[in-house]
Image (cartoon, rainbow, N blue to C red):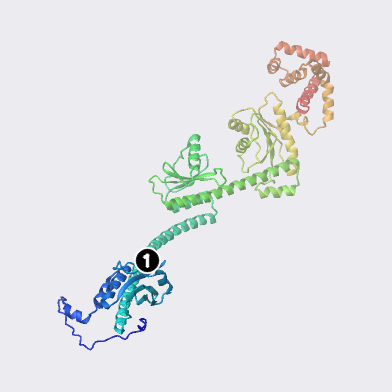
Amino acid sequence: MASHPSRRLSAHVSDQEVTRHPSNTAGTERHDPRALAALDPHGLLVLSHTLFTCAEQSEIVRLAMGHVSALGPYHAEAGYLVTGDGLSRVPGHDAGAPKADDARMKELGEADGSVCLPERSWTWAFGLREAGGLLGYLLVSSHSGPDEQGHFLLSTLVGLTSTALSLTVTRAAQHDNAGELSRLRTERDTALRQLDTMRSELHLQKTVHETLARAAARGGGEDAITQALYELTGLSALIEDRFGNLRSWAGPDRPDPYPVRSSTFQEEMLRQVAREAGPVRVKDRLIALARPRGDVLGVLAIEDPEATADEHTMFALDHAQRSLAQELMHIRELTEVELRLRRQLIDDLLEGTDETSAYARAEAIGHDLQRTHYVVVVHWPSNPANSSFIRAVEQATATSATRPLITRRGDRMVLLTEARPDDDAVYAVLAHELGTPDGAIGVSTRCDSPDGVPRCYQEALRALEVRQNSRQRSGTTFFDDLGLYRILGPGNDLRELEDFVREWLGQLIDYDAGHDTELVETLSRYFDCGGNYDDAAAALTVHRSTLRYRLQRIREISDRDLADVDTRLNLQVATRVWKIVLGGRR
């Protein structure tokens, strides 16, 4: 029975002396083939050189299979390599060899073992291994089992083949490792460059944040933002309102005077910039809009005629725009709160409110109620009391050191101001701003305390009504100048006034109502014109003879002597009360 090939065989060392031939100094040693054959009669040394220099595992297995027969009466039936899918047969040189049972090879479970083949009395699967495990098999057959020398030779071939396969694995791993190392080095260098870029960008961004934060810490404001942007970019920075008016400039070459753009150009520019997500170049400027809630509150720009702006510049401009948007939004909110508080204060003062509370609330919004004030009522029939009208009134009355308190009552604007309007100065400014002279202003007497505001409001209303019912309906009327008309208004007993009118004008009022005439209006105009026939006829747009006829009918119907001084006075006062207090009611 053949001995088991897996047991260790002692190495056979020949007693023959091995003669070594010294090599020459030129490195051109030539070996005697006969001497080499004597030293390596089975060709294993020569084979080992070939195996160790071979890079393909399948070729190594084929070379080993091809050398099996040189070791004795042995035949290489098959060779196998371990792959990801299991054992894979390596085609041999002998195409006519019987096929081994691949399924039986898989049953070996990575161990060496006997394999049954037809017409072979001995077949053995030699495992090709390395330290990491099985690399493949070399399947060898013979008609009889090998002797001790045969075991040694076959084991040596298997060992050489295993070593050669292991070398290819090591070389592949080293190659992969070298490639991986190269790749890692490339990735590391790329990452370091990216890190340097990010570090530089973060430093620039930190500089932008810190500079703008310092500007905010110093109180912020538009001038602080433009100065910070100029320091960050080296380019002149500016802020305009949405209409193109300059609000702040930092840097050299400030235009003087500042150019005025047409409203059409300005609106088109705003639409162009608003369509983009970030700063937009418009001619020599990079422009960003401050619009925190969609409404354009301001325009931030930098002068860049040489187009030198880089990413850092764009980043600084974008963040400065955000700071400006917050600043302008804060200003708008404070303004809206202040306007609301001021409007609430004057509304309460007009209705009557506690003095202590009024003083405290006025002080909170920066208004000194301890000073003398006047109530002013403004009415422009052709202009509704909207925001543009309010703005025009504010601008027209903004001549005093303190802003007036202002509110809206119906289609009229009511102001509480320290400055008494100078004659028709406010009226002239408003007529110019609103584009029409068809307006009137009533001004009260002086008010020395909050509790006098309601009275002064009624005085301003009375002055306005007298103006609007007089011959010259446009202009300014002061309550101080009303004279007799000061008693003909709100505050008097309405019943007594109605009785007075009925006493002096009742017959004329009834006649007008029954005959659709205008005798009371004719009498009122006649008195307004000082008894002048020509002026009264012109005011009534009637002929002089028609006026004489009406006056005669007035004498007849009322049975009053218009030449009598007391009668004329009472009739004139009655017509005034009828028009101003009673509103011309019949």
How far across and how far down the image is residue 291, in percent?
54, 45
Residue 455 in view of the camera: yes
The quarter of the picture where residue 99 lies is: bottom left
Find disc 1 in the rendering and name its residue.
180
* Residue 315 appears left or right of 119: right
Neighbour class for label 1 at 10 Å: few (<14), some, many (≥20)? few
User: Which residue appears at 70% of the width and 12% of the height?
Assistant: 544
Q: Is residue 461 above or below residue 544?
A: below
* Amino acid on which disc 1 is placed: Glu
Q: Nearer the viewer, residue 410 or 258?
A: 410
Residue 552, compared with residue 51, is above or below; it is above
- Left or right relative to 489: residue 206: left
Q: Relative to residue 329, is residue 198 depicted above or below? A: below
- Would you say 509 lies left or right of 24 here? right
| Quadrant into which the N terminus falls | bottom left
Q: Which residue: 70% across, 50% down?
A: 360
Residue 244, image x, y percentages: 50, 40
Relative to 109, residue 8 above or below? below
Q: What percent of the width, then of the height, locates residue 280?
A: 45, 44
Question: Which quarter shows the C terminus?
Answer: top right
